[in-house]
C-alpha cells in the first residue's frame, strides 16, 4: 500500500471503522510523513497497463451515486502518456453518457485493472479531463488503435493521483478464449508429437512380428 492511496482512501469514517475493528494501528505507517507516496507510474505499472484489453471504472454523479462500468478495447488501448498521465479514446456506445456526464460535475475516477490468469490487480485513482474529438484530433489519432473500427467521440485524459497493487488472495483465475487458445495449441502440438511417436512404435512392433525368426546359428 502507498501513502497516496491511504490519504485518499482512509477518510475519517474509514479510520473510525479501522479503529473499531482493530486494524487502525497496522495502517498508521502508510500515513507517516516518511511513507512512500507512489503517485507516479513506474515501468512495471506502464507494462501492466499496456497489456490490458479492458478495465473497470467508477465515477460519481452529482447526486452522490457511484457508477461502475467495464471499458474494453484492443490490447493497449489505455495509453501511458507519462508517469502521471494515462488516456484512452472514449468510443461511441449506447449513448447514455453516464460516465461522461458524471465527470463534468466530479472529475474523480477510479480504475481497477485485472490480470486474471496471473491473479494481479492494479488500482488507480485520478482526475479526468474530457477532450472532444474535434477539439484535439491529433490526440485522438494518437489514442486510436489501427484497425479498430469504433468511433471515438472524445479522449479521457487521467492525471494519476494514487495507485496500489492489491493482494491476490481472492482473485479467481480466469482465461480469455485467446489465452486458452494459446494453451490448446501447445496441447495440440504435444498430442500430435505423441501420436507420431505411437504410430512409429506400432509400426516397429509390427515389423518385428513379421520379421523371420533367427535360429541363432551363424
Image (tube, rainbow, N blue to C red):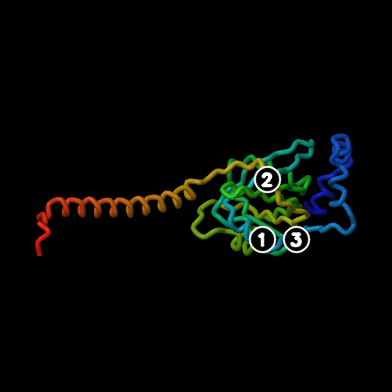
Crowding near pointer 2: few (<14 within 10 Å), some, many (20+)?
Answer: some
Tell me the CA gap for discs 3 and 1.
Answer: 11 Å
Give neighbour class at mark 1: few <14, some 14-19, many 20+ (Cα, 10 Å). Answer: few
Quarter of the C terminus within the rendering? bottom left
Q: Which of marks 2 and 3 is in front?
A: 3
Query: Regarding mark 1 in the picture, which secondary structure is present there?
Result: helix
Above or below, comparing residue 143 to residue 107 in the picture: below
Position of residue 190 relative to residue 171, above or below, is: below
Residue 204 coordinates in the image, percent (x, y): 21, 54
User: Does dot 2 land on a helix, a strand or a loop?
Assistant: strand
The residue that appears at 42% across and 49% down in the rendered structure is 184
Residue ID for mark 1: 44
Mark 3, Cα crowd under 10 Å, few <14 / some 14-19 / many 20+, is some
Q: Nearer the viewer, mark 3 or mark 1?
A: 1
Which residue is under mark 2? 57
| Residue carrying label 3 | 40
Q: Work out whether 70 lies above or below 80.
A: above
Between 69 and 139, the one nearer to me in the picture = 69
The one nearer the camera, 162 or 127, is 162
Task: Return the disc, 2 or 3, that comes first in the chain's sequence.
Answer: 3
Q: What element carries label 3?
A: loop
Camera-nearest residue between 12 and 125:
12
Amino acid at each position: 500500500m502507498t501513502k497516496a492511496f491511504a490519504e485518499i482512501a482512509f477518510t475519517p469514517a474509514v479510520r473510525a471503522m479501522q479503529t473499531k475493528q482493530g486494524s487502525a494501528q497496522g495502517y498508521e505507517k502508510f500515513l507517516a510523513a516518511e511513507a512512500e507516496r507512489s503517485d507516479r507510474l513506474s515501468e512495471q505499472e506502464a507494462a501492466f497497463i499496456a497489456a490490458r484489453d479492458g478495465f473497470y471504472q467508477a465515477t460519481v454523479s452529482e447526486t452522490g451515486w457511484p457508477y461502475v462500468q467495464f471499458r474494453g478495447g484492443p490490447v493497449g488501448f489505455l495509453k501511458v502518456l507519462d508517469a502521471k498521465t494515462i488516456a484512452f479514446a472514449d468510443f461511441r456506445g449506447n449513448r447514455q453518457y453516464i460516465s461522461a456526464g458524471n465527470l463534468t460535475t466530479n472529475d474523480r475516477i477510479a480504475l481497477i485493472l485485472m490480470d486474471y490468469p496471473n491473479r494481479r490487480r492494479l488500482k488507480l485513482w485520478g482526475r479526468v479531463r474530457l477532450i472532444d474529438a474535434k477539439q484535439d484530433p491529433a490526440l485522438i489519432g494518437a489514442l486510436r488503435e489501427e484497425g479498430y473500427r469504433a468511433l471515438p467521440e472524445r479522449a479521457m485524459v487521467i492525471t494519476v493521483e494514487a495507485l496500489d497493487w492489491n493482494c491476490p488472495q481472492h482473485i479467481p483465475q480466469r482465461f480469455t478464449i485467446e489465452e486458452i487458445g494459446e494453451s490448446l495449441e501447445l496441447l495440440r502440438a504435444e498430442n500430435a508429437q505423441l501420436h507420431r511417436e505411437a504410430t512409429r512404435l506400432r509400426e516397429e512392433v509390427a515389423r518385428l512380428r513379421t520379421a523371420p525368426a533367427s535360429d541363432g546359428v551363424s
